Image: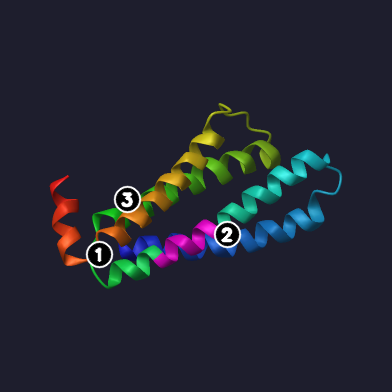
Amino acid sequence: MIKWMMGLGALGGGSAVALGAYGAHGLEGMPAPLQLAYQSAVQYQFYHSLALLLVALFLRFGFSRWLRVAGLAFVAGLLLFSGSIYLRLLLGVELPRLLTPAGGVAFMVGWAAVALAAWCQSATKETECRSS
């Protein structure tokens, strides 16, 4: 799981740079609100690709089911949030509008899972986290 999280995080970060460069030069004729949506997709992709890399690095130091949940949620968020915006704006693919906010919710779940992983880190709390 660590390898694919690191790989996806690296690919996500690298492609965010490329998509950001394209957006800076290739979307000049697009209306401003759509350019802003595109820019948001790129920023969220970049931030959450970095978060995915960090989750993978933390997993190398020890297992935490909450870190695994965080990684999966970040991947889901990247696909649903950024992916749906790219498909709509770059390829004209009309997807259900709820996919984008569902991706935002996945990002929030990921951050909540990171917080739970931190909470469960201490030995006394780890048993509390396993029993619930």
Do the residues bearing badges 3 and 1 touch, measured as CB atoms within 8 Å?
no
Q: Which residue is mark 3?
A: 69
Q: Which residue is mark 1?
A: 121
**Nearer-N-terminus badge (1/2):** 2
Q: Amino acid at mark 2?
A: Phe
Quadrant for residue 109, please give it: top left
Q: CA distance from mark 2 to mark 3?
A: 19 Å
Q: What range of the chain is rendered magenta?
A: 46-54
Local SS, label 2: helix
* Quarter of the figure that contains the C terminus: top left
| Residue closest to the far bottom | 61
Q: Position of residue 64 (x, y in %)?
A: 24, 60
Q: Amino acid at mark 3?
A: Val
Is 50 inside the magenta-drawn segment? yes
Local SS, label 1: loop
Residue 113 or residue 79, whichever sits in front: 113
| Drawn side of residue 61 relative to residue 55, left or right | left
Residue 46's label in the rendered image is 2
**Most common SS among magenta residues:** helix
* Quarter of the figure that contains the N terminus: bottom left
- Residue drawn at x 63%, y 55% is 43
Q: With respect to residue 98, does 2 lie above or below?
A: below
Q: Position of residue 12 (x, y in %)?
A: 53, 59
